[in-house]
Amino acid sequence: FALCFAHSGLFAQDVKPASPQDATPQTSTRPVSFLLGGGLTLGGDTLVTATYTDGSTQSIKGGGLYYFKAGADWRVSPSVSLQGTVGYHAESATGTNGSLKFSRTFLEGLAFWGLVPDRSIGGGIRQVSDGRLTSSGVASSVGTTDFKASLGTVLEYEYFFSRRANRAYGLTVRYVSEKYTPTKFNVAPVTGKDLDGSHLGL
């Protein structure tokens, strides 16, 4: 991630193709580009289940539910790029008299290879920090649990709807493999079995 920004000053000028034949839709005119992403995820072990007054339930999973990320994409060559991002991942169950939430932040470093101009496949590593399950109101008996995550792996398939100049829009399907170990409960140190946080995302 730091390397991408370190090179951004070196590539401040647009790169002009030598001839019209050299201009390809999949090649950004700037090797380093800013990126934003977000999506929905599903999977992982059940951490806790909320029961509402109407009898319905909602489970907080180790791999749910939504995430946002931002970072940089460094195009090493027309078909290869490196990405570094920082993000926020969470799932919550909220009622009028209480709430439950599992949240964490993450860093990802990925490498992508372009299969064709509008499709690419990639993978890399993901490190989660600040994993925490919190509760409030009538659900406060659940307490607060802090988690430590092991280094995870990411696989991603990306399809671009539009990819030209310095702007692109796409859809990705991703799989993340990771585990969480409880380290504290209500500030007191604890030990426990690993919990699966693996998930599919879109």
Image (spheres, rainbow, N blue to C red):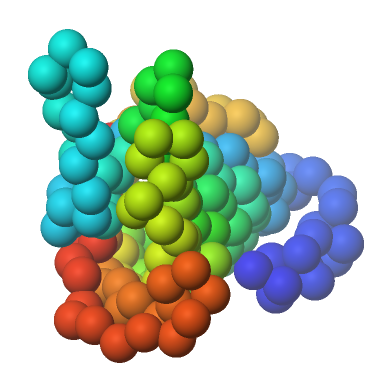
Residue at 45% over, 60% down: 144
Residue 197 versus residue 141 in the image, above or below:
below
Quick check: can you spot residue 167?
A: yes
Which of the pair 137/176 is nearer the observer?
137
Q: Is residue 89 left or right of 9 when viewed as pictured?
A: left
Q: Residue 23, how many percent across, how many down?
A: 56, 38
Which of the pair 141/123 is nearer the observer?
141
Which quadrant of the rendered structure holds the N terminus? Answer: bottom right
Quick check: can you spot residue 114?
A: no
Residue 103 versus residue 77 in the image, above or below:
above
Q: Is residue 2 left or right of 65 when viewed as pictured?
A: right
Q: Is residue 95 left or right of 13 when viewed as pictured?
A: left
Q: How many marks?
A: 0
Which of the pair 84/100 is nearer the observer?
100
Q: Is residue 188 left or right of 14 when viewed as pictured?
A: left
Residue 186 versus residue 73 in the image, above or below:
below
Which quadrant of the rendered structure holds the C terminus? Answer: top left
Residue at 21% over, 78% down: 194
Q: Residue 30, how many percent across, how many down?
A: 70, 48
Q: Residue 139, how many percent across, how many down?
A: 36, 40
Which of the pair 79/60 is nearer the observer?
60
Residue at 18% over, 66% down: 196
Residue 115 versus residue 51 in the image, above or below:
below
Residue at 61% over, 47% down: 70
Q: Quadrant of residue 59?
A: top left
